[in-house]
Every structure is written in structure tokens, then in C-alpha cells.
Image (spheres, rainbow, N blue to C red):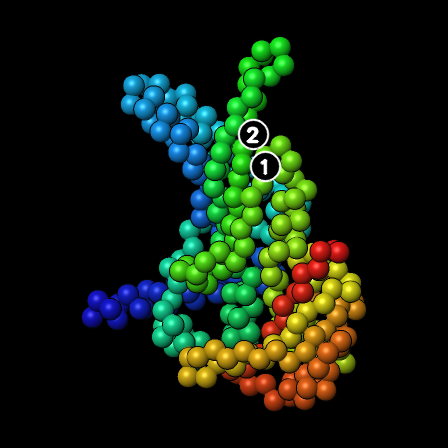
Amino acid sequence: MKKIYLLFVMLTLALGVFAQSKGKNAMTLRLVDIKVTDGTLVNIAKEQEAKGNTKPMDMIRIYEGNVRAKLDEVAKASGRFEISDENALEALTRDAEASLFMKMSRAEKIEYVSSKQNDYTLSCDINSCQFTRRAGGAGYSCVLRLKVSISDARDSTAAALISREFISDTLTEPLTDFFLNNIPVYGLLGYEGDEYVITCGESLNIRKGDQFQVSLIKYSGGERQSEVVGAVKVQDLRASTSAVSFTEGKDRIIELIPTLDANSFLQCRLLLLKSR
């Protein structure tokens, strides 16, 4: 009985997240943590705190807060991300998610798949805090060495999709490049009116000429199957969608679209180009 109740709670929470995500076309970075991992500094701060001196620990909190502010600044400036402090919900078990998915209408499934595609967790370790006396002896400056990691929020057990180290005094440009050119962007491909359209647009900082790899996604008995079928290029941008032309697999994709059912989709993944 307890297991049945827990499953019901998990499904209810998942549906709540799904409902809140409708109409939202943005990539979510769920902030897991920002923490100083410089063992020497942390040990000194703990020792001093035990003696009643809280200044070293206060400085650690300041460093963590400053890094959070910089991550927020760059994420917003990139025009693609929202950083959230909310803890990610526990991932549904495969069986529970499959059961939930199979009960949805096609329209609900499209919304559900869309909302889960661009959902990532963000963590940052401050691995080193290097102090240098300022010229003239007027106090110290501090350079932080950071390791920023991005993971798929759908799989809390998987290794990070990408991690990179940064230095705090030259942070903005390389961190912006990291956000824009290393984190996958996903959408769905469909046919509307007389155009082939993907569910990615200006709100995700997509640009004319961007290319997407297209995969056929099928759900069968709760199992997810994926097959690369072609590629498309953005021709016309809108706020949350883009009209595209074909660069690979045109005939195959055109044949597939009328055959898609409630359990199959054409998923697009942005090909990340350093020339952006």
C-alpha cells in the first residue's frame, strides 16, 4: 500500500510540473549547489569557527554568493537559460514514467516531451582560492578557480554532460561560450500549414542558419528507441518556433511525418558550432 501511495504522489508531482511548463519555451538550469571545495581553506574556516571566529567561513559564503551572481548574469545575458534554485524532483522510475506517458493524449505527450527535453542541472565547485597581496600592501585580491558542470535533470545518476574549469578574473566570455556552444538544445519537428517547423525560436537564442540533427523517437512498451533520420536548417525565426529547410534526409522525414502516432516524434538537436 505504501508503494502504491508513493507512486501516486510521484505521478501527481510530475503532472504538476508538466502543467506549469505549458507554453514555456526556455532551457532550465536547476542549481544543485555552488560550494568551495578548497580543502585547506575549508579546514581553516572550520577550525576558526570552532574558536568563535566566523570571518573565514563568512568569506567562503561571500565567494559562493559572488559566483552565483556571475552565473545568473551570464545565463540571463545568453538569452537561453533560466537558473532555478528549486530542487529537482526525484526522477520517476522508468515504469512509473511509462505508465504516466501512456495515459496522455498526443497533445499532452508533445507538451510533456517538449518540457523535459531542455532541462538541466548546474553545479559549481570552487576548487581553489588564491590570495595575492595588492600593490602597496592595501589588502589582498583573490582569484577563484571554478569547475562548472552541466547534467541532464532527467537522469540524476548519469555523469555530467560537460564540465569545464574557469578562472574568476577572466570569467564572462569563456562562461558565455560554455553556455551557448556546449549545452544541447532540443525541439520537435512538425508540419504546419505549408511549412516544416521546429519548436525552437528566438526565445532560445536560435539564429537563422542554425542546423539541427533530426531523430525519430519511438516509445514502445515503455522503452524509448531513437534513430537519426536527417538534418534541417533554420530559415525563418519566430518567438518560439522556426521554419526550416532540409539539409539531409528530406524524403525520409517527409514520409515519416504522416505516419507519426501518439507514441512517436521527430526530435531535433541543435548542432553546436564554435563559429556561432
- Residue marked by disc 1: 167
| Mark 2 nearby-residue class (10 Å; few <14, some 14–19, many ≥20) | some
Secondary structure beneath disc 2?
strand
- Residue 48, x across and y down, in percent: 34, 21
Q: Is residue 275 visible?
A: yes
- Estimate the x, y position of residue 190 in percent, counting from the top left: 66, 77
Q: Residue furthest left?
A: 1
Is 165 located above or below residue 1 in the figure?
above
Query: Which is more N-terminal, label 2 or label 1?
Result: 2
The answer to whether residue 192 is seen in the rendering is no
Q: How far is disc 1 from disc 2 in space, using C-alphas? A: 7 Å
Q: Amino acid at mark 2?
A: Val
Q: Where residue 259 appears, x then y in whole percent?
A: 61, 89
Residue 82 lies, with reference to residue 115, above or below; the image says above
Residue type indicated by callout 1: Ile
Name the disc covering residue 79, or none: none
Along the horizontal axis of the image, is 63 left or right of 91?
Answer: right
Task: Please determine whether, in this image, residue 203 is positioned above or below residue 100.
Answer: above
- The quadrant of the rendering that contains the C terminus is bottom right
Please name whichever residue, 140 or 80, is drawn nearer the observer in this view of the structure.
140
Residue at the disc numbered 2: 143
Q: Quadrant of residue 272?
A: bottom right
Find out whether the residues at labels 1 and 2 contact each other: C-beta distance under 8 Å.
Answer: yes
Left/right of residue 25 with respect to residue 102 in the rendered view: right
Position of 113 with respect to 93 (left or right) is right
Q: What element does badge 1 sit on?
A: strand
Q: Which residue is pictured at 72% across the width and 87% down the height?
A: 251
What residue appears at the point 68 percent right and 89 percent down from the top-left corner? Answer: 255
